[in-house]
Image (spheres, rainbow, N blue to C red):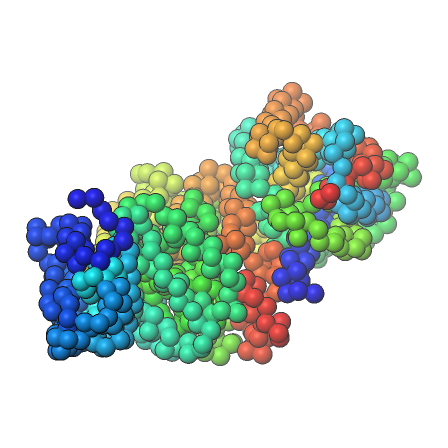
Amino acid sequence: MPEDQRTIENRVRASWRVRACTAGLCTGAQVFLLGTGAAMPLALNGAWIASLCALPAAALVALCGRRACAAPRRDGPLSRALFLLLGATLLLCAVFALASLVNLAGETLLVQARAAWIAAYALAACALCACFGGAGVGRLCFSLRWMMPLLLGLAALTQREARIEGLFPLLGTGGRPLLAACACMLGASAPALLLMLPPPELREAGEAARACPVPGAGFFVVRVLAGAAVGVLLLFAASVCITYEAIEASGEWGVRLHIVADTQAHEGVTQTLLTVLELTATELLAAATLSAAEQAIVRALPAAGRHRAGLAALVLLLAAALSAMTVNGFVWALYAAPLLFAPALVLALCHGRLGDRAP
Amino acid sequence: MEDAVTLTPSLARNLAVLSARLHVPQNADVLIRRFQSGAFASAVVAIDGMVNSQRIDENILKPCMDLPRSAGADVAGAARAAFLMENAVSVIAAKRKDNVDEILSDVLGGQCALLCEGCAQAVVMDVRGYDKRTIGKPEVEHVVLGPHESFSESLRTNITLLRRIVQREELVTQFVSAGGKMKTRCALLYLRGTAQEAMVEKLRARIESCDYDFALTSGEVEQLIEDSPLSLIPSAIRTERPDRAASFLAEGQVVVLTEGSPAAIGAPATIFHHLHTSDDASMRWQYSTYLRVIRLIGMLIHVFLPGLSLAVLRFHQELLSPMLLTSVYETSSRVPIPVYLEALLMTLAFDLINEAGLRAPGAMGNALGIVSGLILGQSAVSADIVSPLLLIVVAASGLGGFCVPSYALSIGLKIVQLLFLTAGALGGLYAMSLLLIALLCAMCAMQSTGSPLCAPLTPPRRANRDFLLRLPMRYQKARAFFARRSKDD
């Protein structure tokens, strides 16, 4: 094989690796957010069991994503409609992440600040990240992919007084709430949908790069599952740390996101660091899904152009987030999140119509 | 008289054209010397002070004028320049040219042109002889163990310094001109077979496409070749050290030298190049790894500490012990201005002292630093204008800034520091983490001559184990990711 061709193939493979790790990190963050937001109130300490349902779903979406990217490019009305649906789903993921970000920050780091300001900061950061394109966010997610295991390690540090009853997830809940939580957690696989879009770097790459083979299914599935598994383990850490009483009493979403620790000075530092890491993962989830949504919308509406479509996506996001905040607070996003599984299922079933390679 | 594009066989006409273009006789430092060289008349054109007069006298005028009257009588007019080159002048760097613009550019650059009657060509010879600074010690990139030579303002000397280190036949030097009207000579140096040819062509095209009137310094040339003019972080690396520039060449980078600038530019560069020093290669891997960690910590303190202190004081008081918090609030309560303004003013004052110390001549700079830092700082604390905690924070942060090996990066980080200071004051750790993500996102998206700035960390690329930490030499056999692959890779 000529040297240049080998180099191009290696670089294309590296781009796919970045993409798969981004999808993994986003899925892990979504599992944790949805677990603490929707599954935990239903199943209490059984939330992490419910979150196991997200794993096969995420693997299925990753598999379909790989096949969609390897398929020949299609530009028919159906594929455009599917890309539009993909964009909308990812946009909803971004809104959901933003909602949880604002809630978590308001309940932990900035208790005295106004929610509008917190939301404005988050939106500004998200918009900035999206302006630099999907490549920047993806690469950042890849370089920070060890952040979630670090989060896990820090969580483990605070577990000196872990409660053994947390290991028995069905205690305190019944089978029906657990099933409901499982159904909710299926939607946590939605961020893995960004694998249905090729890495942004390949959009500007030459024909030689676009013609390079897409890595095998295992390449994607392993990375997405690794990310999702960290989310499950984080939920497990929360369940063995927080008592049932504390979970039931924590009506606010942000409080549930917060892993309880002692009040010693050094524990306070660990606690703050944990919160900052959770915020960072959530912001990355929002930025990555927003950039991917923009990419999907541009693919669905090529005439709109990259910047106009990106702008439209941002305006939509802004309007949705602000109106939701003023009317209902951010909790509506929590109820909408499980429904993400429906579009994800549609897209997974129609993956053959979502080809995105050069003809 | 309209400008002629090429020379004509008439010596008088050629001299008239050159005189007109050089504004002779108003222009007093243009030397035009007519003389008889064998059977035909000739003339030398040069700029006084730019050439070595002794070399012109001995190697051009004397041999030409010593030719017998019959010499060259049977030589056709068009071949007279070649005849003189082969039989009279004894200058090694000589070539024939017929384009008036090129000849004028060479003459203005310190070369001399020999024209003869009946020939539409001139012999352009390198007899440069202007005064220049000798090779000195590096002023910015100090090292403990490495070589103590730095580039000077002479392009020729700088190329020689590099060639003395890189004694390889693959080392290629290409000359290009930057700037529209006032052309600045630049040299592109690279190792053929190691650097990507496409990269060389890209850099050459960027320098040549400059349509400004002038690009005099390497700083301006650097701005011409960088991919992201709006970014706070430089996307090319500058060095004043020939040994570092030689390491760039070995890595597969292209080195750009500029006439009149004592610095070399290496491209493409990664963010990790800005954190390395020449000393890293001169010492054992354990020591350089430790020092790199220290530098990294210094850099993090420089960027984050002022913002972090403000965030803790304003939003996250739970991170401080009650005793410390009481003490901090007690001293802060006596300061009449808000804590953000206090921190901002102190940071700016630190930069003011630093800049004044840098510009003040010689020993005065050191005295200025001591007077400003000690006396003003002490007085400000005594007068309750600033709190002691913030004084410590700003001083530690400033000290961390001096750990950044790249001067250009350190200035960029000062601006980033102010951004984090503002974010910490407005939204505590939350705003700081959001700003950090946005800035990192921008940095990850940046490119340096088409190569990702944050590679090999992200996106992943093959690399030596020598980007953030430095591992033993046996792990450093691979070429950089932007170079052509070697057989060992």
Quarter residue B63 falls in: bottom left
- Nearest to the observer: residue A33 or residue A346: A346
Image coordinates of residue B356 in percent, x first then y, are 23, 54
Image coordinates of residue B225 in percent, x first then y, are 42, 52
Q: Is residue B427 visible?
A: yes
- Left or right of B312: which side holds B177? left
Q: Residue at x 47, y 60 (%)?
A: B200
Q: Residue at x 68, y 42 (%)?
A: A257
Image coordinates of residue B50 in percent, x first then y, are 17, 64
Quadrant in which the N terminus of chain B is drawn: top left
Quadrant in which the C terminus of chain B is drawn: bottom right
Q: Residue at x 52, y 46 (%)?
A: B442
- Left or right of B257: which side holds A339? right
Above or below: residue A185 compared with residue B16: above
Q: Is residue A157 visible?
A: no
Q: Residue at x 19, y 64 (%)?
A: B116
Above or below: residue B270 compared with residue A305: below
- Nearest to the observer: residue B31 or residue B378: B31
- Nearest to the observer: residue B385 or residue B410: B410
- Nearest to the observer: residue A207 or residue B115: B115
Q: Quick one: which residue is furthest to the right in this view? A: A175
